[in-house]
Amino acid sequence: MDCGYINQERKKGLGYLTEMTTDTENGIVLGVDCYPANHRESDIILKHIEKIEKDTGLKINNLALDAGYDVGAVHRGLELMGITGYISCIDFSNAVLKRATRYLPEKDCFECAGGKYLNFVKLIYKKTTQNYYRLYRMPKEERKSCLSCPFFKKCAFSHGESRINAVPSIRLFIGIDKGMKRRHIRL
């Protein structure tokens, strides 16, 4: 196997990544795989799980992963494989969710303290950070009235829009932001 070059702020050089799966109920290692270090762990975990299931003949039902695997592709892959994944929380600093706003799941929008709605516009993937953002925006004609709103100085929304750090499913994200244990939700 070829090794890969690690080019991170605190780590540089040639190296490998290992994936290890253990059966915590019986205390045994099910498998270990080694990959070049220039791959992202989130890209190789699904291959590793498939290999473990094939090699052992066992069906994995539940899986615990660290926060590095908290990406949409892993969530979707686990869902397709019928695996419930438990992923540790990532603390996002979303001011909009901590201020006087309210998320309305039935409408997938936010309501500001002034009673105006910011509707979901689109899901954005930013390559440089490998994060998803959900863009919420207030209709243009309503933005002008924000200047006269009594809550304007404390408003979490910038120019009638807000970009929320999130996984593709807002239901998953709202649970994280409220400090709940992160649990993969079947859609």
Image (cartoon, grey):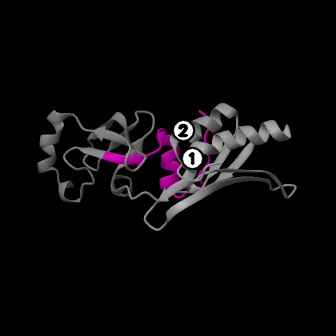
Sequence-first tag of 1 and 2: 1
Residue 168 forms part of the magenta stretch: yes
Measuring 37% from the left and 48% from the top, which residue is drawn there? 128
Measuring 38% from the left and 57% from the top, which residue is drawn there? 98
- Residue type pointed to by label 1: Ser
Q: Tell me which corner region of the image, top left, top right, bottom left or bottom right, holds residue 74.
A: top right
Pointer 1 residue: 42
Q: Secondary structure at mark 2?
A: helix
Find the magenta span and give its range. Answer: 163-187
User: Is residue 136 found left or right of 92 in the rendered image?
Assistant: left
Question: Would you say the residues marked 1 and 2 are in contact, meaning their CB atoms lie under 8 Å apart?
Answer: yes
Mark-to-mark CA distance, 1 and 2: 8 Å
Answer yes or no: is residue 77 visible.
Answer: yes
Of residues 46 and 25, the one drawn nearer to the viewer in this rendering: 46
- Counting from the top left corner in percent of width and height, residue 151 is at 21, 55
- Residue type pointed to by label 2: Ala
